[in-house]
Image (cartoon, rainbow, N blue to C red):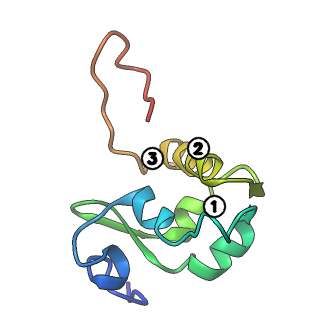
Amino acid sequence: MNWPHDPDGEEGSEGMRKYGMAILAKKLDEEEDFPLSFEEFAAEYGNDPIRINYRTVVPAREILEGVDVEEVEDIVAFHQAVGKAMREGGFWDYHPVGANPERKSA
């Protein structure tokens, strides 16, 4: 796919490889962007590349399509909504260990 910018370049991840939600959250200003409409956020950033892991890059819209709320009030709610969408959409590579390895909290 032809990306609007290099997912590993300065615009995509500040010159170093960053992954998933960190890239989406960097696009926000906590003071000015909330409450945040996911429809508007997806319209602006939906084509941007999001690196999921060392071999997978997807358009932001593929992750944002799984968000089940229209708007969030703050960055914490943003992380919760996007994290849930990433887990349910199979974009989360986190594999926990411990007493209940089936529970995937992040």
Q: Regarding mark 1 in the picture, which secondary structure is present there?
A: loop
Q: Nearer the viewer, residue 90 or 70?
A: 70
Residue at 22 percent of width and 72 percent of height:
16
Mark 3 vs 2, N-terminal side:
2
- Quarter location, residue 43: bottom right
Labels 3, 2: front one: 2
Identify the image quadrant of the N terminus: bottom left
**In the image, is 18 to the left or to the right of 25?**
left
Mark pair 3, 1: CA separation: 13 Å
Residue at 71 percent of width and 63 percent of height:
34
**In the image, is 74 to the left or to the right of 90?**
right
Mark 3 — residue? 90
Q: Nearer the viewer, residue 52 or 1?
A: 52
Vertical order, 35 against 39 (above or below) = above
Q: Regarding mark 2 in the picture, which secondary structure is present there?
A: helix
Residue 78, horizontal then vertical, whole percent: 61, 53
